Image (cartoon, rainbow, N blue to C red):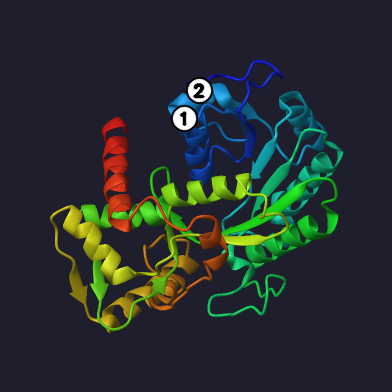
Amino acid sequence: MSQKYNGNVTPTGMKKILITGGSGFIGTNLVAYYLDKGDQVLNIDIKSPQHPGHHNYWKEVDILNYEHFLRAVEEFRPDYIIHLAARANLTGKTLDDYSVNIEGVKNLIQIGNKSDSIKKIIFASTILVCERGYVPEDEDDYCPPNLYGESKVAGEQLVKNESKYFEWVIVRPTSIWGPWFGPTYRRFFEMIMRGRYFNFTGKMSTKTYGFIGNSVIQLDAILKSDQSNEKTYHLGDYEPTNIKEWSKEIAEELDRKIFTAPRIFIWILAKAGDLLQKINIRFPLNSFRFNNMTTDSIKPMNEIKDLVPELQYSRKEGNRLTIEWIKSQENHE
């Protein structure tokens, strides 16, 4: 039975896990997972939890404030930290706009280096340390396409160069989806649920996606493993997903059909979206999203597959659970 942390004594077998950014998508699922397992959990985040049952396990902390960050960690004395806090959008104008991805990592490394309780820290990075289509020679070969990717490269390099007195692991989530996700993939599901989604003729992308239930289990395996230290893992499902096939699976779960539009029509809409974006009018499609829907992005999954040979959730089961969650949220809105 999960319980609120109220002291420094940890019952035998119970882990003390601190999650930065635990109010976000992946963090919300991780908090729920470890609470269900009976571990002691603390979420530190500048935002309050999305999940109404997680408020007792949250402390409002800005990780850019080193003293407050340090105090929160020292009071909780975690065995493990999963660092998810970040600015993840692409709207920043300079690298300074992504200071949480650099200075926040630097603060955590300093805290980890002086702690006598922390055994391992997992640092969440991004697949955008390399642009789509770029095949790196190794995990130190970077080619970021934007400032967000650059900030995460800087964060990875800090982890590798400055971490001294604790075990560290870097994870690069692929396109993760499922309950508690944000607008991008939730909109994809909602459009299908409302009969407003359609595919288009010709090639559509095949990518490495990941259902959140599987990603949480992968993170837990990395946390427990004695072999994961100083490695970089991608998080995601092992079989790549074609967007056309996926949309049809979701539609079948809803007893709907997916219509197909001419490719040139979608391309014209994307160009129109570009023009509207310049005058600050939001439109659901632009060239960036069109390219995203037509460019393959398949990531190497062998490293994480060695730790978790079999995934717990199939894509179809993930579809069902996600649809159920969306409907439950709509009933409360």
Looking at the picture, how far across and down is residue 24, in whole percent?
A: 52, 42
Measured from the top left, where is residue 127 in percent x and y? 57, 65
Q: Confirm whether residue 38 shows in the render.
A: yes
Q: Label 2, on which residue?
A: 2
Q: Are marks 2 and 1 in contact (CB under 8 Å)?
A: yes
Q: Is residue 107 above or below residue 117?
A: below
Q: Residue at x 71, y 64 (%)?
A: 153
Q: Quadrant of the C terminus?
A: top left
Q: Which mark is residue 186?
A: none
Q: How many marks?
A: 2
Q: CA distance from mark 2 to mark 1?
A: 6 Å
> x, y percentage for residue 77?
74, 28
Residue at image coords 69%, 66%: 150
Kind of residue at badge 1: Asp
Q: Is residue 315 above or below residue 40?
A: below
Q: Which residue type carries mark 2?
A: Ser
Q: Pick the residue in front: 298 or 276.
A: 298
Q: In this view of the protein, which residue sits in the foreground, 266 or 74?
A: 74
Q: Is residue 84 visible?
A: no
Mark 1 crowd level (few <14, some 14–19, many ≥20, 10 Å Cα): few
From the viewer's perspective, tell me whether residue 237 is left or right of residue 160: left
Question: First in sequence: mark 2 or mark 1?
Answer: 2
Which residue is located at x 58 percent, y 74 percent?
Answer: 131
Element at label 2: loop
Disc number at residue 36? 1
Q: Is residue 149 left or right of residue 211?
A: right
- The local crowd at label 2, few if under 14, some if 14 to 19, many if 20 or more residues have their Cα within 10 Å, is few
33 over 143 or under it: above or below:
above
What is the quadrant of residue 209 in the picture? bottom left
